Image (cartoon, grey):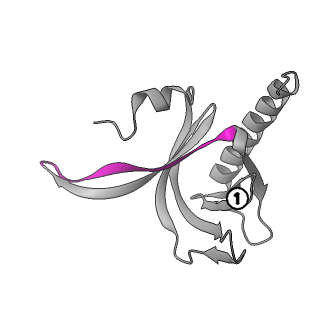
Amino acid sequence: MSIFPKDDIRKLGKLLMHGSFNVWTVHKDRYKMKDFIRFKPSQRQIYLFERGIVFCKIRMEPSDQGLSPHYSFKKSMKLMTLSIHQLGRGSSRKFEIANRNGLEKYILQAASKEIRDCWFSEISQLLLEQQNNNKGKVTC
């Protein structure tokens, strides 16, 4: 059973990377404009595609072979709507993904600095490529 509709996943392009991250969610209240951050991170399986990123929740459920992981879709975001940022000192395993409107931010913590660097580099490169591809397009 698929965790998200096949038609939607095809629009995101080729799967490039996937991995497990601790994720903190930061929301900006549209009316009060106060930051709200979830202090306890969520464990998420993250899938990076050519044109998007998908967050899934990991749950261990009983099966014939004991406990096995099950993934449920939580969120998808198109890369062209995102920005990515390094975090300050003391955050060697973390980076931030945000919607360009600034209302949603996600702080991702990788298992190691090397994994963080690899993901940060790949997402940055994809964003740069998409930005360059969109420069030649005229929008009305």
Give the residue number, with chain letter if any, for mark 1. Answer: 95
Residue 90 vertical position relative to residue 14 in the rendered view, above or below:
below
Name the spot of residue 29 as percent of width and height, x first. Answer: 65, 71
> In this view, which residue lies farthest toward the left?
64
Quadrant of the image containing the N terminus: top left
In the displayed structure image, the side of residue 139 where residue 39 appears, left or right: left
Which residue is at 69% across, 61% downward?
A: 103
Where does the magenta region start and end? 64-79
At label 1, the amino acid type is Phe
Q: Give the dominant element type of the magenta stretch: helix, strand or loop.
A: strand
Residue 83 vertical position relative to residue 49 in the rendered view, above or below:
below
Quadrant of the image containing the C terminus: top right
Name the spot of residue 2 as percent of width and height, x first. Answer: 33, 36
Residue 136 vertical position relative to residue 89 in the rendered view, above or below:
above
In-front residue for pair 110/55: 55
Name the spot of residue 77 as percent of width and height, x first. Answer: 60, 45
Q: Quadrant of residue 79?
A: top right
Q: Quadrant of residue 123?
A: top right
Name the spot of residue 27 as percent of width and height, x first. Answer: 63, 68
Q: Give SS at disc 1.
A: strand
Callout 1: few (<14), some (14-19), or many (20+) C-alpha neighbours within 10 Å? Answer: many
Asked if the stretch drawn in magenta spans residue 24, the answer is: no
Asked if the stretch drawn in magenta spans residue 71, the answer is: yes
In-front residue for pair 94/52: 52
Which residue is at 72% across, 63% downward?
A: 92
Which residue is at 47% across, 56% downward?
A: 44
Which residue is at 36% across, 49% downward?
A: 71
